[in-house]
Amino acid sequence: MLLTPRELELLPALPAELSQHGKSCDSAAPPEATLIQAAAAIGADPAEVVRLQAKLAADEILRNRVYTLKAWDRQLAAAMPQVAVPANLELRVRQALAIAEPALEPVALNTNTTPQKYSRRRWLGGVAAGGVAAAAGYLGWLNWPRSRTLDQNEIADAGRWLDQYLREDRWNKDNFPLKEYPLPAVLRYQPLGWQSIGRELGTPAVAYDYTTNDGQRAAFFVIPQPESNLTTAVPFRPQSSTQGMCIGHWRQGPNLMVLVVEGNESRYKNFLRPDRDVPVV
């Protein structure tokens, strides 16, 4: 004898401790009354739950399977609150998929520290949700730009990136990805924010915001380019300029570094510290 899908949904209404004789372990209350109360707690028809209990009472093998299943449910419920969520998990996923950080609104914190009880139905729902998330992540991976090597013309024209790729509503003000996209010591200032431009540029990349107090626009781009043969010397003078932007670029480790500053050569130089222990040209 097997359980129907509907009977599986009703299993949470059975007593938390189901004896191997198909009766509640709580001898202080009649089993049927206990079942009716449990059915009401999950919004189920009490008659369905009573019939399910009778079905289990008539089939020892099925009853033992349900007993084992509910014991496993309790073990899982006890283990779930002990599983720590990795730090910044959502942010790291968004970085990998180049999804903009959403605007967050204040919400009331739940101060109830009592661990939740997880039923098989909730667990299955969580598994289904996880499957959907995994599928979404896979699709995002398919659409994520593969790494490519930028040519010299693209880099020399990086001044247009500020207008074409950067969006004011996408600047993140914390959780800077400095481990994956490190900033060089030669930069004089600390960035105000960062955003991923991988989709726009067609290769994984991060832009750091260096806009000054007087509104002068500047950005520093870190782009993984392991196959690049660019020089490692930091250009103290801009190598190119376009549309009022001064541009300098160099390679540091596996990354291409691109500094774009609005204004003249003097303003470009103001962002660099030639006293750092790095080659400067």
Image (cartoon, rainbow, N blue to C red):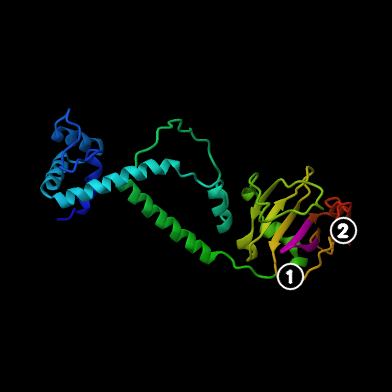
Give the residue at x 17% y 55%.
Answer: 2
Check disc 1 and report its element: helix, strand or loop. Answer: loop
Label 2 is placed on what type of residue? Phe
The image position of residue 123, as x and y in percent, is 34, 48
Which quadrant of the view contains residue 251? bottom right
Task: Using residue 111 as the reference point, say whether residue 102 is left or right of it.
Answer: right
Q: Which mark is residue 236?
A: 2
Work out whether residue 62 can be spotted.
yes
For label 2, the SS is loop
* Side of 163 where 34 appears, left or right: left
- Residue designated by label 1: 228
The magenta stretch spans residue 116: no
Q: Quadrant of the C terminus?
A: bottom right
Q: Residue at x 20, y 32 (%)?
A: 26
Q: Which residues are magenta?
A: 248-260
Residue 237 sits in quarter: bottom right
